[in-house]
């Protein structure tokens, strides 16, 4: 019950963090590509 809920929220947070990292990384890479 409770442990399962906490585990789910943990993975959800991990996915959101990874997504934000991916977006910022891709954005920086695209900006660098346009300059070159």
Image (cartoon, rainbow, N blue to C red):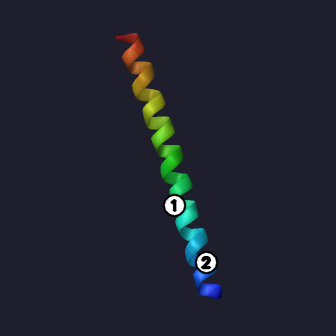
Between 34 and 5, the one lying in front of the other is 5
Cα separation, mark 2 vs mark 1, equals 12 Å
Residue at the extreme bottom of the image, as rendered: 1
Vertical arrangement, residue 25 with respect to residue 2, above or below: above
Residue 34 on image: x %, y %: 41, 13
Q: Which mark is residue 28?
A: none
Vertical arrangement, residue 3 with respect to residue 14, above or below: below
Q: Is residue 13 left or right of residue 33?
A: right
Q: Are marks 2 and 1 in contact (CB under 8 Å)?
A: no
Q: Which mark is residue 6?
A: 2
How packed is label 2: few (under 14 Cα within 10 Å), some, or many (20 or more)? few
Q: Residue 1 is drawn in which quadrant?
A: bottom right
Q: Residue at 57% of width from left, 63% of height from top? A: 12
> What is the quadrant of the C terminus in the image?
top left
Of callouts 2 and 1, which one flags the residue occurring earlier in the amino acid sequence? 2
Q: Residue at 51% of width from left, 61% of height from top? A: 14
Residue 20 on image: x %, y %: 53, 45
Residue 22 on image: x %, y %: 46, 42
Q: Residue at 40% of width from left, 27% of height from top? A: 29
Number of numbered markers: 2
Q: Is residue 1 left or right of residue 32?
A: right
How packed is label 1: few (under 14 Cα within 10 Å), some, or many (20 or more)? few
* Secondary element type, mark 2: helix
Residue 32 on image: x %, y %: 39, 20
* Secondary element type, mark 1: helix
Residue under label 1, please give it. Answer: 14
Vertical arrangement, residue 1 with respect to residue 24, above or below: below
């Amino acid at each position: 019950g409770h442990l399962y809920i906490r585990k789910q929220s943990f993975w959800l947070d991990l996915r959101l963090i990874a997504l934000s990292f991916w977006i910022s990384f891709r954005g920086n890479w695209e900006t660098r590509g346009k300059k070159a």
